[in-house]
Amino acid sequence: MSASAHAIVVGNEKGGTGKSTTAMHIIVSLLKAGHTVGAVDLDARQGTLSRYFANRRGTAARLALDLEMPRFEVVESTDDGAADRERLLGVLGELAPASDYVVIDCPGHDTPLSRLAHNFADTLVTPLNDSFVDLDNLADVDPQSFEIRRPSRYAETVWEERKRRMLRDRGSVDWVVLRNRLSQLDARNKRRVGDVLDRLASRVGYRVAPGLSERVIYRELFLDGLTLLDVMESDSGVDVTMSHVAARQELRALMDALQLPGGTRAVDAA
C-alpha cells in the first residue's frame, strides 16, 4: 500500500467486541478533522459497518444533512483465496494514494483476507470486552493464579504478520488494545483483567488504551448511522444528554491514545 495513507486495521478474532462501532467513530473523527479517508469492510457476511454507512446515507437524505462519508468498499471472502487477495490489493491500491487514512474493519474470525489486512496495518486496533472470556482471545490464563500460560492464537497471528511486514517493507505495526465496555464500578474482576492485560502487553507487544463504555446511545446511533460527533451538531435531530457528553470524552481519550498523525482535531472541535 502507498505510503501516502496511514492504514488503521480494526481486528479481533472474536465477535461482539465493538469493532465496527469503534471503526465508525474513528472514521468520522478523521473525516471531521478534514482528512480524506478510505474505508474497507472485510466482514461482508455480518456487514455491520456496511449497514452503518447505509443507515447514514438514509439519515442524510431524510433530514437533508451533509454527513461526511468516506470512500467505502466491501471485499468479500470467497473460496478463491488468490482472487480474494488480488481484490483486496486492488482496492487498497485505489484508496491509499487518494487518502490520508485507510480504515479496515475485519471479521470476528480468522480469514486469509483478515491476515493480509493485518500485514498492511500501521496501527492495529483490537477492541476487547472487559472480561476473561474476551481476554482468552489474547492469552491462555491460569484460572487459579491468573498467570499467563501462553499467548493465544490471535496474538501469535499478529506476531507472524508483524514479522512479515518487517520483511516486506521494514515497516512496524503499532498494536493498541482497547478496553471496551468497561463497567463504571470498581469490581475485582475489572482489576484482575487490567492486571493481566498490563503484564501481557510487554510480552506480546501492544499498548493498552481506554475504549468505549457500554452505553445504550451507541446502539441507538447505529440505527441512524450517526456518531457522537454528529449528534453534537444542532441539526442532527438527537437530543444531547449527559451520556453523550461523557461518551464524547471517551472518544477524545481513544483518539488521543491512538496517537495518529493529526487524528484528534475533530474531537477537540466538536
Image (cartoon, rainbow, N blue to C red):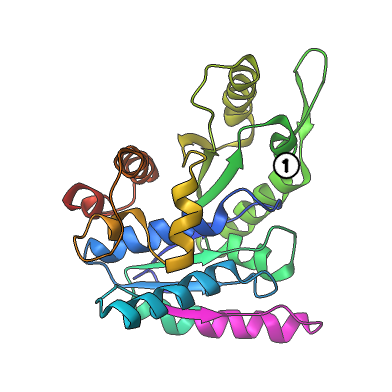
At 63% across and 14% down in the image, what residue appears? Answer: 188
The type of residue carrying mark 1 is Asn
Residue 155 visible to an observer of this rendering: yes
Measured as percent of width and height from the top left, residue 247 is found at 37, 42
Query: How far from the left and from the top, in percent, is residue 91?
Result: 51, 83
The percent position of residue 236, horizontal first and vertical second, equals 27, 65
Residue drawn at x 57%, y 24% as measured from the top left:
198
Q: Which residues are magenta?
A: 71-91
**Residue 164 located within the stretch drawn in magenta:** no
Q: Residues within 10 Å of mark 1 (few under 14, many from 20)?
A: some
Looking at the image, is 135 positioned above or below residue 108?
above
Image-quadrant location for residue 87: bottom right
Q: Is residue 123 visible?
A: no
Q: Which residue is mark 1?
A: 137
267 or 119, nearer to the observer:
267
Residue placed most toward the observer, 180 or 222? 222
